[in-house]
Amino acid sequence: MCANFKPLTLAQLHQLGLPDLGFECPDEIYPNYELPLLFQSPLGLEWRKVHFGMIPKWADDTSIALKTYNARSETLQQKPTFQNAVNKCKFGVIPVAEFYESKYIDNKPQRWGVRRKDGKAFYIAALYEICQKGQEIIRSSTMLTMDAIDHPMMKEFHEPGNVKRSVIVIPHEQLETWLNWKSPNISSFITGFPVEEFECSHVPKIKIEKISPQLNFFD
């Protein structure tokens, strides 16, 4: 499962011809951080700042996002946390430059980064939710995942065993189709990303002295 990623850069945003982003994001994003979600509105492609981790209306507080940042595509309609969003077809994407997974070397986890070989950002399939708690409007999202036991790259990540997961990557050419999809059945999008277009490498986490809670998106 993906719990940490680097959002797309300003150069990548322009490369994909996406609308300008009107807010800043951390340099790296973790569960319950705010992230840039891209979705289709009546006015066209729009950005929203949302929590990383689905926060349903019935949740007591936003800490539930620490457990709901990934959603298994196989069980979306059986899980109360995600039922409303998938039945209402609230599909979006989270554009990322790189996401991180753990690879176990000699039984010890190492952080590895997965990215496109051509340097472009790519779209991770997401569900999003909007709910009101008192006077507060809360927007949140979750990354959709699939079984990856047979994926040439993703099967090498996570703890040793038979459970291997991967985020679902929406190809650039299918972005419009995905964002306008009007059925809870998303089986046609559940395919492993083409490994020949991606690469991965060991990316040790660098300890940065915390100066402010928000790092500049445009660094």
Image (spheres, helix red, strand yellow):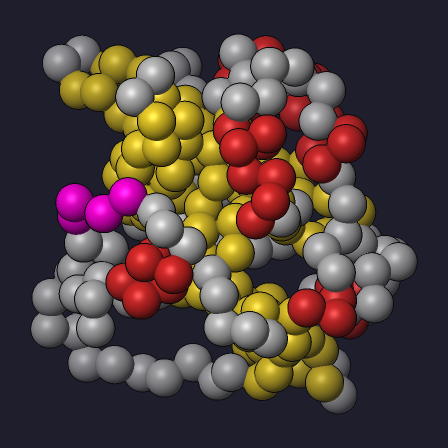
| Magenta stretch: dominant secondary structure | loop
Q: Position of residue 152 (x, y in %)?
A: 83, 67
Q: Residue at x 53, y 32 (%)?
A: 176
Q: Answer above or below: position of 41 versus 189.
A: above
| Extreme-bottom residue of the structure | 106
Q: Residue at x 36, y 32 (%)?
A: 45
Range covered by the magenta-colored residues: 19-23
Q: Answer above or below: position of 100 versus 63.
A: below
Q: Position of residue 105 (x, y in %)?
A: 72, 85
Numbered circles on residues, count = 0
Q: Position of residue 180 (x, y in %)?
A: 53, 22
Report whether 106 appears left or right of 96.
Answer: right
Report whether 191 appears left or right of 19.
Answer: right
Q: Nearer the viewer, residue 187 or 58?
A: 187
Tell me the quarter of the picture where residue 73 sits. top right
Q: Residue at x 52, y 56 (%)?
A: 122
